[in-house]
Image: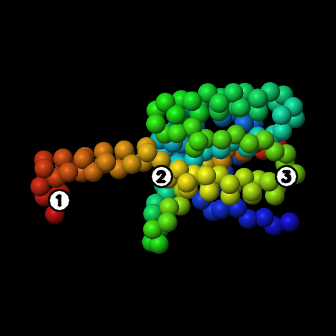
Amino acid sequence: MEAIQEKVEVSSMTQTGSFEPAILAFCCEH
Amino acid sequence: MRLSYPANVKIVKVPCTGRVDLLLVLKAFEAGVDGVYLAGCLEGECHFLKGNLRAKKRVQYLKTLLDEVGIGGGRLEMYNMSSAQGLRFAEIAREMTEKVKGLGPSPVKRIRNVECGVRNRNSEIRNPKSAL
């Protein structure tokens, strides 16, 4: 859970006003 | 082969997508992510036999749940690919970014921002010096 918290970057409106979504990908190691 | 994918996609490595349970995904949304996807092995090729199939079922269930609570099931996806499909991985990361961009910011974040604003205003009323 802490690992997720560290990885999450809260998305925000950039200076240009465009929205950059924060996406989390759970990837299988295999 | 050097492939690039959008920087806003953060990867959490798991031994198997079967390890990803509902709470883990819900916690991620609570933490402020706008979209989540699971990248598992191809069907029938799971190292742990049925992990990816379990994950698929969970994702299907969670999508309905997210729709019901108003977050939107479209913010969650499950993809299957092999470790040799790096190009497809990068393509999916871009595809998911575009999809979530279209959906806009997560409503969870909006609600949290409003609540934080109310809390800050209340603390200013109780303690006017904090507002200065």
**Label 1 lies in what chain?**
B
Q: Residues within 10 Å of mark 3 (few under 14, many from 20)?
A: few
CB atoms of marks 2 and 3 within 8 Å: no
Q: Nearer the viewer, residue B43 or B72?
A: B72
Kindly report the distance in space between the C-alpha atoms of the residues bearing marks 3 and 1.
54 Å
Residue picked out by circle 2: B105
Query: In the image, what residue type sits under mark 2?
Result: Pro
Q: Nearer the viewer, mark 1 or mark 2?
A: 2
**Label 2 lies in what chain?**
B
Whole-percent x, y for residue B55 in the image: 70, 31
Outermost residue, bottom side: A16
Q: Looking at the picture, does residue B123 appear above or below residue B132?
A: above
Kindly report the distance in space between the C-alpha atoms of the residues bearing marks 2 and 3.
29 Å
Query: In the image, what residue type sits under mark 3?
Result: Gln
At a point 76% along the width and 53% down the height, the residue shown is B89
At a point 59% along the width and 33% down the height, the residue shown is B63
Query: In the image, what residue type sits under mark 1?
Result: Ala
* Residue B20 image-quadrant placement: top right
What is the secondary structure assignment of the residue under circle 2?
Answer: loop
N-term-proximal mark, 3 vs 1: 3
A12 on left or right of B21 = left
* Residue B87 image-quadrant placement: bottom right
At a point 55% along the width and 54% down the height, the residue shown is B102
Whole-percent x, y for residue B129 in the image: 13, 58
Assign the N terminus of chain B to one quadrant of the image: bottom right
Q: Residues within 10 Å of mark 1 (few under 14, many from 20)?
A: few
Residue picked out by circle 1: B131
Q: Residues within 10 Å of mark 2 (few under 14, many from 20)?
A: many
Residue picked out by circle 3: B85
N-term-proximal mark, 2 vs 3: 3
